[in-house]
Amino acid sequence: MLERQLAKAEEEFIAGRLDAVADICGEMIAADPQCHQAYYLLGRTCVTLGKTEQALELIARAAEIEQDAAPYHTELGNVLAMEEKFEDAADAYRRATELAPDFIDPHVNLGAVLQLLGRHAEAVEIYRKSVELAPDAAMLVFNMAEAQRAMGDGEASLDAYRQAVALESGWAVLHAKLGDALVDHGDPAEAVECCRRAIGLAPDEADHHIALARALLAAGEARSALSTCDAYMASHPYHSGLVACRALLLNEVGSRSAAERLLGLEALVRCVDVAVPTAFGTIEAFNGALSEEVEQRFAPEYDPDLLVTQNGKQSTSLFFRPGPGVALLMERIDEAVRAYIGDLPDDPNHPLIGHIPDRWRLSGWSVTLEPDGFQTAHIGTEGWLGGLYAVEAGDGIVELGAPPENWTCSVAPPLKSLAPASGQLMLFASYVYRRIPAAGGTRCYIAFEIVAEG
């Protein structure tokens, strides 16, 4: 009877008749509260419906009943990762690898979450085991190369990138990543060749053109690098990374005024006081509430911006299921953005002004920096407009304009420093590089991007 019900539930699941799956699983659990297969399938159904909290509870129950079932622990890790609970996800995946050493899925997923947690050395070891299980899987070798590069093992990462390219030569990303690593390794000529191959395979991928521009700049060919950006931007939609790259290159070839106009460090940067929500009375009370809310969202080792945060902690997505203080801040940000748009000059040929979105959403997170903490230079890769809200400014500053250290610029770029007070909001183009240097005290910011929709 149970086997027939399970087979029927699986059939309904595959057919997408999820209500029927829930009914059958409910009947099985009612008949046998220890029916782990029903809990598991019902949990997978909840995942399909986007009900991750319920899925987590159900799959955890299945794993509790049948503790030696590696697929249960793997799926539990998947749901935990969806919820951005990466430490717990890593534990679940590791348990699955212990139960089924030859089951490749949990190895791959464990390596991925370890990378997200910045535990690159551990990720490399996991990927090595994965490659032993599937030696022809270019994705696994590529992931291993990425982890090796992140931990500073340049020689090993180059070997792994080359191995991945040999396994799957038609995958454009592998050529571009190998080119990027070669630039860092001091071989821009070969890097240029790799990036050109990537563009030949995927000509519409903006990141490949950025990689080529960086390689050309490293090779001393700044004008060719600028031409690469211009050619792409003439026939493709707005891309913040290309605009950031173009601003650097304009400055490199002697067109500083054009670079300054593009970055808008004077004309397009705003620092405004946030109106205190009535419910809080003072900005200190408001910021105190924000501090408590963001503290609950920190994953100490999680950094979605590829570890730009050092000696600090960064939250997971802050605007998903916001608390009352964050929800009010989101309203204030929306008001500030609308005022910002209303104040923009009439300059439709400017990439920021010419791409004002009709509709947008907020993407953001919080970061708290210790006295010696800092953030390295980065841009907003998905947004139109970027910003920071100073929850606790201390004596910190925010620097705009300087690129990451791996860009081999020979001319100092346009720069602007902001010294916000607690309760102030900063707005700037998403393609403007921003960094937060170390300072004497603790600082807390809420960073956000205005992402175009529709």
Image: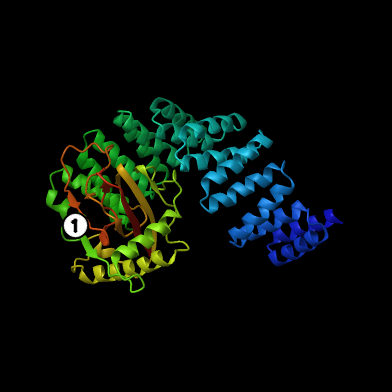
Q: Which quadrant of the view contains residue 350?
A: bottom left
State which quadrant residue 297 falls in.
bottom left
- In the image, farthest residue toward the right: 1
Q: Is residue 297 visible?
A: yes
Q: Is residue 306 above or below residue 383?
A: above
Q: Position of residue 399 (x, y in %)?
A: 22, 49
Q: Indicate the quadrant containing the C terminus: top left, top right, bottom left or bottom right.
A: bottom left
How is colour applied across the structure in the image?
A: rainbow
- The vertical placement of 375 against 15, above or below, is above
In this rendering, the answer to whether 17 lies above or below 112 is: below
Q: Residues within 10 Å of mark 1 (few under 14, many from 20)?
A: some
Residue lying farthest to the top in this orientation: 155
227 or 392, which lies in front? 392
The amino acid type found where label 1 is placed reads Gly
Helix, strand or loop under label 1: loop
- 246 on left or right of 333: left
Q: Position of residue 166 (x, y in %)?
A: 49, 31
Looking at the image, which is closer to me, 33 or 199? 33
List x then y, in percent, for residue 151: 41, 32
- Residue at screen point 27% across, 62% down: 423
Which residue in the rendered view is the most extreme toward the bottom? Answer: 278
Quarter of the figure that contains the N terminus: bottom right
For residue 353, above or below residue 41: below
Q: Is residue 454 visible?
A: no
* Residue nearest the observer in this picture, 66 or 37: 66
* Residue designated by label 1: 264
